[in-house]
Amino acid sequence: MLRWIAVALLLLASSSALAAECEVDIAATDQMTFDTDAIEISKSCDTFTVNLTHEGTMPVSSMGHNWVLAKESEVNDLATAAITAGADQGYLPPDDERVIAHTDMIGGGESTSVTFDVAKLQEDEEYLFFCSFPGHSMMMRGSVTLVD
C-alpha cells in the first residue's frame, strides 16, 4: 500500500512540473526591469501563459508595463509604432499582426496575464518579449525560445 501511495505522489509531482512548463511568472519593477531576460517554452505545450506582476508602486501613467511577444526582427519597428499608438491603445497599435501575444498595460501593485497558442511560434524563428511603454523596450526585453 505504501508503494502505491509513493507512486501516486510521484505522478502528482510530475504532472505539476509538466504544467509549470507551460506557464511563467514575470515581475516588473519601477526601475524598468523584468526579473528575467529569457523564457523557454516547451514544444509539448499547446498554450503558454505569461503572468505579469508590477512589483513597483508607480502608476500606469508614469511607469506602466506590459509584456509583448514578437519576432526579433520586428521588435524595434513595433516599439516605435507602439509609442505612436499612445496610452489610450495601451501603447500597442490595434490589431497589429506583428504582435503574437501581449498583456494589458499595468501599474504598480497590479497584475495581468495572457495565454497564447504555441503553434504561433516557428522553430526556426527568433522571438523577443518587451515592454511597449515609451522608452522601456530597449531595457525591458528578453528572448523566447522553443525547446524540446
Image (cartoon, rainbow, N blue to C red):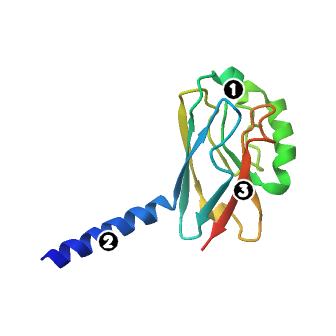
| x 53%, y 28%: residue | 109
**SS type, badge 2:** helix
Residue 109 is marked as none
Q: Position of residue 11 (x, y in %)?
A: 32, 71
Instruction: Identify the image quadrant of residue 89.
Output: top right
**Left or right of 61 on screen, residue 55:** left
Label 3 Cα crowd, 10 Å radius (few <14 / some 14-19 / many 20+):
some
Mark 2 lies on residue: 11
**Left or right of 135 on screen, residue 30:** left
| Three-letter code for the amino acid on which mark 1 is drawn | Met
Q: Position of residue 91 (x, y in %)?
A: 75, 32
- Please state which of residues 77 and 37 is positioned toward the viewer in this rendering: 37
Look at the image and tell me in which quarter the N terminus lies: bottom left
Q: Position of residue 8 (x, y in %)?
A: 25, 71
**SS type, badge 3:** strand
Measure the alpha-carbon separation of dots 1 and 2.
43 Å
Measure the alpha-carbon separation of dots 3 and 2.
31 Å
Rendered position, 21 above or below 27 = below
- Please state which of residues 93 and 141 is positioned toward the viewer in this rendering: 141
| Three-letter code for the amino acid on which mark 3 is drawn | Ser
Mark 1 lies on residue: 63
Q: Position of residue 43 (x, y in %)?
A: 59, 70
Look at the image and tell me in which quarter the C terminus lies: bottom right
| x 87%, y 45%: residue | 77
